[in-house]
Amino acid sequence: MVLMVVLGLVAILGIIGTISSLKERNILGIIFGGGSALVFGWFTVMTLINSGFPVAH
């Protein structure tokens, strides 16, 4: 549960960083921000599929 939330937040921050880098035309920022958003987003999806969606108690 906690891992999925943390990885999801990092993926969202990567998307925000990529958008910011696109506005400033920073190529290295686009590469690293987009790469981290893709990797951490993939980890989030795979954690969700592997562990399942947490139930509310």
Image (cartoon, rainbow, N blue to C red):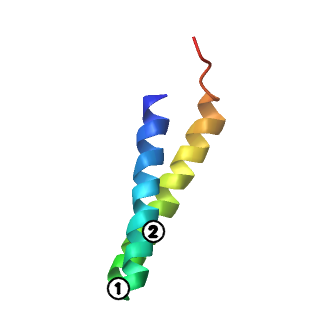
Q: Alpha-carbon neighbours of circle 1 within 10 Å: few (<14), some, or many (≥20)? A: few
Q: Residue at x 42, y 47 (%)?
A: 9
Q: Position of residue 18 (x, y in %)?
A: 42, 72
Say which quarter of the image contains residue 33.
bottom left
Depth order, front residue of 4/15: 15
Is residue 45 shown above or below 38? Answer: above
What's the mark number on residue 49?
none
Mark 2 = which residue?
35
Q: Position of residue 31 (x, y in %)?
A: 41, 77
**Amino acid type of the residue that numbered disc 1 sits on in the rendered structure:** Glu
Residue lying at the far top of the rendered structure: 57
Q: Position of residue 47 (x, y in %)?
A: 56, 38
Q: Alpha-carbon neighbours of circle 2 within 10 Å: few (<14), some, or many (≥20)? A: some
Say which quarter of the image contains residue 51.
top right
Is residue 55 shown above or below 46? Answer: above
SS at circle 1: helix
**Amino acid type of the residue that numbered disc 2 sits on in the rendered structure:** Gly
Mark 1 = which residue?
24
Nearest-to-viewer mark from 1 and 2:
1
Question: Mark 1 vs mark 2: which is more N-terminal?
Answer: 1
